[in-house]
Image: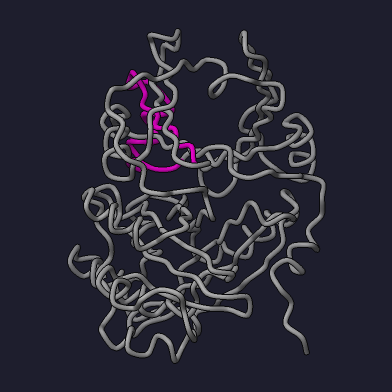
Amino acid sequence: MSVQTFAEKIAKAPDFLPINGTDFIELYVGNAKQAAHFYKTAFGFQSLAYAGPETGVRDRASYVLQQGKIRLILTTALNSNSPISEHVKKHGDGVKILALWVDDAYKAFEETTKRGGKPYLEPQTLSDEHGEVKISGIYTYGETVHLFVERKNYKGLFMPGYEKWESEYTPKDAGLLYIDHCVGNVGWNRMNETVKWYEEVMGFVNILSFDDKQINTEYSALMSKVMSNGNGYSKFPINEPAEGKKKSQIEEYLDFYEGEGVQHIAVATNDIIKTVSQLKANGVEFLTAPPAAYYEMLTDRVGKIDEDIEPLKKLGILVDCDEEGYLLQIFTKPVEDRPTLFFEIIQRKGAQSFGAGNFKALFESLEREQKLRGNL
C-alpha cells in the first residue's frame, strides 16, 4: 500500500475557507513595552507599528513587531477593568489571537459560524487614508481566537488604528522567516472534540496522529493530532494529556495557564545553525541537549544530511526524517515565568512532518525542566 504524501492528504480539505497563511499572532501581556524590547533583543524582531493613547486608543497599548513574514502584536490593558487584564491575570502572558489572512473576512465569518463557530467579533471594516481592512473572528479552544483578516484593499503599514513605530533600536534579525505551525494544548479527552471542530467549522483535515504509545517516556505521555487547511499554509497540532506515572508537560501547562491555549509557536528558518547560534548569543534559553548517543546514531536513523553533526550536537538541535526529506528543530524554554508558552525553531529540508522521531528525546528534556520546577 502506498503512503500518502502530505500534499495528497491536505488536498482532501474542503475549500469553503481559503486561507493564505498567518496574518499575525497577538499576545496579551502584562507590560507590552517591556515585552516588545525582549522580543527585539532576544529574537531579533523589528519595530513596525503602534496603537495606544497617542493614536487615539484609550484602553490598551499594542506594539507590532515583524521579522520575515512573521508579525507579533504585544498588547497590554491600560486599566484593571479590562478583558485584557482579566486574561493576563488568569493565564499570564499568552497568545490570545491567531489571525489568519483570508480573501473575504465577511464570508469567512459566515461560513464558520453557520457550521458552529462561536462568534468573537462580528464582521467590521476598518478604514483610513490607506484603504480598508475587513476583520471578523471566532473562538477556538479555550479563550483563543481565530481572527480573519482581509487586507487586499489596504496599502498602509499594518492596519487602520496603527501608526508607524519609530525606534532607534534596531537589533539584527535572527533569520526567522514565517510561522510554520502553532500547537494548542487542550484538556483531558478534548483532542478529538477539537479535531472535529476544526474539520467541521474550519474545513481542516487531520494529516497526522500520534497516540500515547508513540509519545511517551518512563513517566508521562500525551496524544496529538495535526490539523491543516487545504493548501497547508495553516497547521494547528492539538495535544491532550494521557495517563502516565507522573504529570505530563500538557498537564503542567493546563495547570499553570489555567485552561486550554497555545503551547508553542514554531517559526521557520533557512539556516538553523546560524539562527540558533545568534539566538543563544542574544540570551534565548533552549532545552538541554539530548545525550551524545543521540548524535552518534543520527545518520543511522535519518540517513545522510547536509549539515555537520558537531555544530548540531553543540547547539542541541534535533533531526528527524519522513518519506519526503528531513527536518531540524529545537525548542526554547518557556519565555515567561509560568511554564507555558515556548517557541520552536524549525528548518525543513523536504520533510513535512513534525519530528516524531525526536519526541522521546524532547519530552525527556522537558521532564528534566519540570523536575527542576517541582512539577513532574
Give above or below for 271 relative to 365: above
Identify the residue at image location x=76%, y=86%.
2
Is 224 left or right of 198, judged from the image as shown? left
Q: Looking at the image, is 312 positioned above or below residue 183? A: below
User: Quadrant location of residue 106?
Assistant: top right
Residue bounds of the magenta highlight: 70-95
Mark count: 0
Residue at figure coordinates x 29%, y 88% from the top left = 293
Q: Quadrant of the N terminus?
A: bottom right
User: Viewed as shown, does residue 23 lie left or right of 369?
Assistant: right
Is 83 one of the magenta-colored residues? yes
Q: Position of residue 257 (x, y in %)?
A: 37, 50
Which of these two is toward me, 37 or 137? 37
Q: Residue 179, how many percent across, how many down? A: 52, 49
Q: 15 or 123, which is in the foreground?
A: 15
Comparing 266 with 245, the one in front is 266
Q: On the picture, is 231 further left or further right than 76? A: right
